[in-house]
Image (cartoon, rainbow, N blue to C red):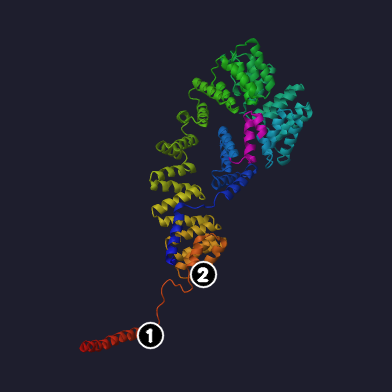
Amino acid sequence: MHIRSVVSVSALIGATLLLTGFTWGFGKDKCLKANDMALKLPALTDEVQRSRDESEILLLCPEGGAASFVQGVQAEHAGNIDVAVTAYRRALQLEPSMSVASGNLGVLYLQKGLLDDAAIELTKAMNGPRIPSYHKALGKIMTERRFYSLALYHYGETLRKTPDDAGAIAGQADVYAAQGQSDRAMEEYRRALLIAPSHEQASIELARLYQQQNHPDKALDTLKKAVVANPRSAPLHLALGDLYEKRGEIQQAEYEWLLGGRKSASSTTQASQPEGLLRGDRLAVQGEVERAADAYRAVLNDQPDAVLPFERLGLLYFKTGRDGDAITAYREAAYRNSLNADVYYNLGRLYEKRSQLDEAIVYYKRTIERKPDHADARLKMADIRLLRGNVPEAVEQYVEFLKLKPESADIHLKLARIFLKNKQFSYAEDSYKAVLKLAPDNLDANRDLASIYRNNGNNEKAMEHYTKALELQKDDAETRSALVAIYVKEKKYDELTALLKQSVEIAPDDPNNHYKLGLIYDFNKDHENAIASYQKAAELNPGHARALNALGRAYMKTGRLSEAREALEAAKKADPNLVEASILLNNMQDDFRPEPRKQSSRKKATAKKKRTTSKATKAKSKSSAKPKAAAKKKTR
């Protein structure tokens, strides 16, 4: 095989590699960095730094567990607890050992009254950084479960790092009060109120202890101060109303109850409800679970067919994580044909939590029967249908949900992916457009929509959205590969070169980036820049066989044979199985030159003399042959 042919084949191989895409080498290290940053987020107190770190995590590894964790944090800060829970769960699916996702999820479970689930997640969180808020949440759970020593340990750990945490101090006071150490509990409650005068728990419990010790005036003074410090607190107004009621000041009690969100006792609605229900409600607000339950049951003794006591019991147990009791109470309410849609919705959630999906579907349907605009029930049904592979019904419910909550970009995105998976490209395109209308910077929507346009042959639109995706995430290898392929197909070599240069700028220490840039220079016959790129790749990784081979090939093209031989020998040493290097070396001759050398004037004269002598000899031979032929003829 001739050298020139081998070089041409090599160039073709390089171009083929370029067309079919490369392994860019991004992702893993950046996701590890994102995970490390995520572990430090809960401890950050500087909001500006926190915001910067969140943004960086989303850019570093947008599809990883750290990004889902950040999305959960942002949803939680926005007050969207259900979205936050979903995001934390997704983070743990991607990164099961992400302790901060477990911790944050545990805290939210505790807020929702799911004590068992909260305890599991918070215990897992203890394998990572010891965040004070996680210890505080575990302290509350241990107090509720009456593991007082463990509760004090976790509150102590909280206060060791955050000594001015009023909630942890009040939590310790709860433990002392539960153990009968009233004086010590009161001391801790007062300490908490010095730090946070509006603290609900400390104010209510301190007032209760004052009443137990027959100091009603101190109890009243405590609650009044708390209401002044926190005038929008419903629990404080309700507790103050209860205290006025005990003092016989009914008018003032009704006023405080009204501020607490409960109609006055003289109103028609409230008058129609048994006193036991109202008392149970007040106790429930104060966290007196068993006393509240007793009050509701007392109503049932007089009215065994009543619906409201079972509804209230179900809600009470639901909030405190007593799922079995909640199911029993809610089912009794449902049996009595409760008109409250949340009774059926909460039953559906409880059964779904137990993976009893058939029962969950039944109660979500009954929720919608009583309240057709119950968006969350429709979303739950859609998710279960999708999980079971019933795509048409899932799509139907997602569409109904979006009619009720059209601003839900995440559900538009989910619907778009369903359509895309089922090759319903026009519907998918519409859904992705809906996502981008609500969230123009959504990376997934831009990337997926670009893919649809590319498959339809609309490369202009595809390039637009791929470019946008790269603006959002510069190290997106999948998008870069797709964009490279389009640029090659459309012969946009300037854009292609710029894209590969950007890869070098993003990761200048990655030898592969320099090697790939060298390939496009080679493709454009810019041999000097190609050589520089290959040299850089070999400098960063002396064992980079492909870069060394390409360098040797480029040297051959420019006539630098000794350097070519050296580079090809190095390539062969780095990878003995690299066929091209062996072929090029075998066909390289010591006297090979890219172009034939010109002959010297002396050699030209010698060659000319030889040609003249040869012609003269031939002529002489012909002339001597003629007389001989004539003589022979004459003789005959």
Q: Is residue 432 visible in the rendered structure shown here?
A: yes
Q: Is residue 273 above or below residue 103?
A: above
Residue that badge 1 annotates? 606
Helix, strand or loop at mark 2:
helix
Mark 2 or mark 1: name the one nearer the start of the chain.
Answer: 2
Of 376 and 312, which appears nearest the observer? 376
What span is colored magenta in the figure? 94-120
Distance from Cα at disc 2 to Cα at disc 1: 36 Å
Instruction: Name which quarter of the figure residue 595 lies in.
Output: bottom left
Q: Residue furthest top?
A: 302
Residue visible at 60% across and 23% down? 259
Which residue corresponds to the image point at 29% horizontal and 86% vertical from the top-left?
A: 621
- Residue holding disc 2: 563
The amino acid sitting under disc 2 is Glu
Quadrant containing the C terminus is: bottom left
> Front-most of 152 and 170?
152
Residue drawn at 73 percent across, 40 percent down: 160
**The label number, if any, that marks residue 427 in the structure image:** none
Callout 1 secondary element: helix
Q: Callout 1, which amino acid? A: Thr
- Residue 427 position, x and y percent, is 41, 36
Q: Could you say which is closer to the camera, residue 625 or residue 325?
A: 625
Location of residue 198 in the rendering, given as x and y in whole percent from the top left corner: 66, 31
